[in-house]
Image (cartoon, rainbow, N blue to C red):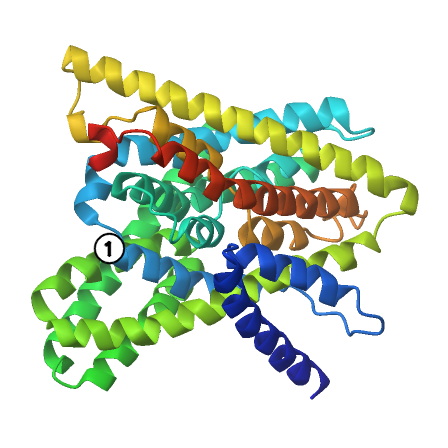
Amino acid sequence: MENYSIVIFIMAIMIGLSAIADYIKLPYPILLIVAGIAVGFIPDLPKIDLNPEIVFLIFLPPLLYDAAFNISYEEFRVNINTISTLAITLVFITTLGIAVVAHYLIPDMGWPISFVLGAILSATDAVAAMSITKGLGLSHKTNTILEGESLINDASALVSYRFAVAAVAGSAFIFWKAALQFAVLMGGGYVVGFLIGRLLAQIIKRTHKNRLVTISFMLLAPFVAYLVAEDLHVSGVIAVVILGLGIARFGKVVFPENFKQQSKAIWDIIIFLLNGLIFILIGLQLPHVVKTVTPAQILPYVGYGLIITIVALLLRMGRVFMQQANLQQHFKQGKGKITERALLDFKNSLIISWSGMRGIVSLAIAIGLPHKLNNGDPFPQRSAIIFISVVVVLFTLIGQGLSLPWLVRLLNKKQPTLADKA
């Protein structure tokens, strides 16, 4: 009963602060994170654990499904080259880059542990990216790339994470096995999402005149897709994304406009509550993880987190601007299927680079680290990994989140180019 009261209390704070954020023109995720940190330091407040299974089952499926349902499939297809580069290549580059920095920067952090930290912080978070950038007036192209990247990159990060944790336990890294596992995760998730999407489409054809039943099936579908995929040991994230994309295309033909508005109103309330709870929970983690390290370690770990945040940002900027140059070159040479609509310019490249926030997925993975190895030994430097992960998440969300609106306003003062209008 006590925990129930705390959840109600947190939701009341979340709703009130969201209204205040609109009034003071501050991104509401930032205000909620700060509030979560403040609430977490209240004396004698019972600890609210961030359960990774709850995050991946309750929060991610509806949030990813909503994003995939509303994303422009045509714009997604046009920019698939950039999206796949950021969602796959950049994830592995970031994992390696953070691992190198952590190994040489943090005392006693061996290579396997460094790669665990790199994998945890390698992927941007769909919830964070979409919440921070919402309402900033970004171009349709930029929004699609950010959302598309965030919807896909979890599979890449989870593969890196699983092999890094296995390496800590003593298993050797074998490239072809990693590549095969990645292909199975992605391909299997695609098949599950496609099949459940087809099944849902057949159900909707027969029930679409009953709006409550249809909306209920659509609310249930992402959870079913995620659970089925995870039970089959493939990517539940990809399954939900493919389901959302498929139903979005199907819905354009079947659903009348007034039905879409009714469905959207329900989803908007659900997404608002889930988003708010997530950012409050992120803030709540800092007071708890502070207690897991000694006072002498806090300042150095915060410094390590800041350096890792800067490294991750620089790696992202380098890869995004390299992608811009590659697209320009291939377009001029007529290679591949690169069209003018797929090109990037300085403005959207900089915004995409600056929008790489980490969030609830990184925290859930970090907190989900096993306490012990298979041989019974404690997991090495578990507290350090969790603390640094929380610090990096807060630095990216608060630092980049606060500066992103200013950056967008500054860039919007310039004359928009053809690429921005696409």
Mark 1 closeness class: few <14, some 14–19, many ≥20 residues within 10 Å: many
Residue 83 placement (x, y as % from top left): 33, 36
Residue 360 placement (x, y as % from top left): 56, 54
Kindly state the secondary structure of the residue where label 1 is placed: helix
Image point 25% across, 64% down: which residue? Answer: 196
The tally of labels here is: 1
Q: Nearer the viewer, residue 193 or 314?
A: 314
Quarter the N terminus occupies: bottom right
Residue, far top = 333
Residue 277 placement (x, y as % from top left): 55, 67
Q: Is residue 407 left or right of residue 245?
A: right
**Residue 339 falls in which quadrant of the image?**
top left
Residue 366 placement (x, y as % from top left): 65, 49
Q: Return the residue at label 1.
A: 245
Q: Is residue 151 left or right of residue 294?
A: left
Residue, far left = 253
Q: Is residue 67 above or below residue 213?
A: above
